[in-house]
Image (spheres, rainbow, N blue to C red):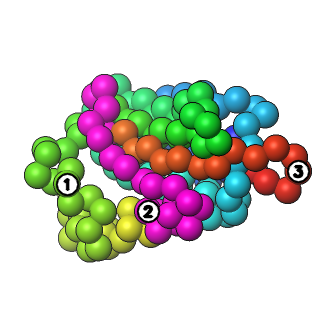
Amino acid sequence: LRAAVQYMQRLLEHRFRAEEVQVVVAIPEQLQVRCDLNRLEQVLVNLAGNALDAMQDQPVKVLTISAFPPEGERVQVRVEDSGAGLPDELLARVFEPFFTTKASGEGLGLGLVISSNIVREFGGTLRVHKGVQGLAFEFDLEIVQGEGHV
């Protein structure tokens, strides 16, 4: 899990720096989850990219990626931003294909649909709710022991 987060950070490093975003990662080093590393990275890049867009006009920009203590055999992963958030009526639509709050030509409205499908392939569910300030996306992944997993 931590490796996928680090790959995402490298891919978006230029945006984090240029937009002065503080990235907080709270994931235990030893935590390993059952998934495909590249597909998990794709989910994280999409969630972080959306968060960057949401925080664009905010004075304080913080992206927090955390893993909650395991509940049984699964861990909850949270990606939370300090953006403006969304009203409830739009929040309910974020997983609809082609739904976007971005200006025309800036997004297809498929990123969250694709991310949700990837998480489902891992046996989890991608959810969204209002965070402390912006939005928080959460999904669950199976915890594994041993080699061959991220």
Amino acid beneath label 1 = Ala
Circle nearer the N terminus (2, 3): 2
* x 26%, y 74%: residue: 98
Q: Which residues are magenta?
A: 115-135
Quarter of the image holding residue 134? Answer: top left
* x 69%, y 44%: residue: 143
Q: Foreground: 108 or 4?
A: 4
Q: Is residue 104 magenta?
A: no
* x 87%, y 46%: residue: 146
Circle nearer the N terminus (3, 1): 1
Relative to 2, is 125 on the left or the right?
left
Residue linked to disc 2: 116
Residue linked to disc 1: 92
Relative to 5, is 54 on the left or the right?
left
Amino acid beneath label 2 = Ser
* x 61%, y 57%: residue: 40
